[in-house]
Amino acid sequence: MIQRLKNIASGCGVLAISLVSLAAQPALAQTCPQDLCACLGAAGHYGVVATNSIKLVSSKLTQSDGSGGKYVTPFPASVDDSVCATVGSFAGIRAETPGDDDAQLGADAILLNPTGKVAATFVGYKVAKVLTPAVSVAGDLVTGGGTIKGAAAATITGATDTSGTSAKLPGCQQALSDFKSASATLQALTATQTIATTKIRQKGTDLDINVGAGTNVINLTSISLSPQVTKSYGYAYAVPATVNINLLPTTAVVIINVAKTVKIGKSCAIAVLGGDPNRVIINAYGAKSSVGIAADASVDPMVLVANGGITVGRGAAVGNLFGKKITLRGAASTTNLACP
């Protein structure tokens, strides 16, 4: 663009020079909390960060076909981006179509356990007594010197480095402290908006949270969403609950601080509408906080639990996860924040 403006300088004189000057100005750096990448630091470079452990296990659901037979639906556990944790366990489950139920990592697996400890465990399955790999890692597998158990059950596209000296280790180590610092920083912010109750408890009903321009901070005690079972003409069906977070074009970020627990029931959802889900983060900051996301649920915002665990059930879809102990069982981390 600058070269094009220089080329027309003879026709537009001072105006062209002025535009070149403006175009050459560096963008103003965003700071926390206006920029969640600035808050998260090194943690923002990973899809999942766990100070203790990550467990990524594929699952399947067996159902009746209505005519005396059965059919099986595979649910591969997956993380689109890199994973950073102290120790990891990864397992696929045999499906009718090979590969349908692999546990999948879309980039690196960086596991910090040192020499003398197991850093990664992989579990596959056997066909005719022959082990079949059931875990795929699209990037590198790096440990802090720790060993790899069940390596034959994994397909590693990149390099495998158990030397404990990889250049990728310091970034992961920094990420473990950075996301905990981010939780404390976000929790200390003054609320900018209040809603009718600090305990969101929806059963088969929807709740809209309309946020404003700029930085929005909402402080809650807990969030609990559950389906309502309804009967009609002799049939029972479940109506899920949803919280809609409605953004404006001018919304910079939405920070939802939760003092206790977050429980998202089967097929329930926290949806971000009107903008990028990665402008919204749920920060469960309490000493005993935890987050549970049930089967077939969806949570658009990033989830941060500095002192507790995150469990995600079969068929659920989530974004970035930061916690102490993280389990995805047949679930997918798909809408990942991409920090520069």
Image (cartoon, rainbow, N blue to C red):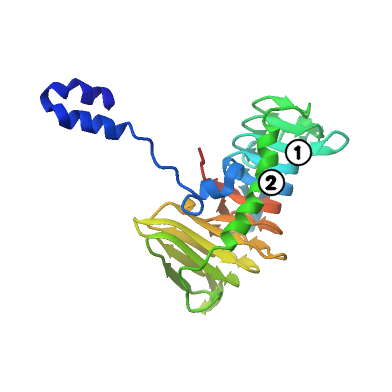
Tell me where residue 215 appears, x and y as whole percent. Answer: 44, 59
Tell me where residue 45 appears, x and y as whole percent. Answer: 58, 40
Is 248 on the left-hand or right-hand side of 70? left
C-alpha span from label 2 to label 1: 10 Å
Indicate the secondary structure of the residue bearing disc 2.
helix
Tell me where residue 326 appears, x and y as whole percent. Answer: 69, 52
Which residue sits at x=16%, y=32%? 15
The residue sitting at the left extreme is: 11
Indicate the secondary structure of the residue bearing disc 1.
strand
Residue type at mark 1 is: Leu
**Quarter where residue 288 is shown:** bottom right
Return the residue nearer the eye: 21 or 265. Answer: 21
- For mark 2, what is the residue? 176
Which circle, 2 or 1, is nearer the viewer?
Answer: 2
The 10 Å Cα crowd at callout 2, few under 14, some 14 to 19, many 20 or more, is: many
Residue 271 in the image: above or below residue 96: below
The answer to whether residue 65 is visible is no
- For mark 1, what is the residue? 112
The N terminus - image quarter: top left
Return the residue nearer the eye: 336 or 179. Answer: 179
Residue 47 in the image: above or below residue 19: below
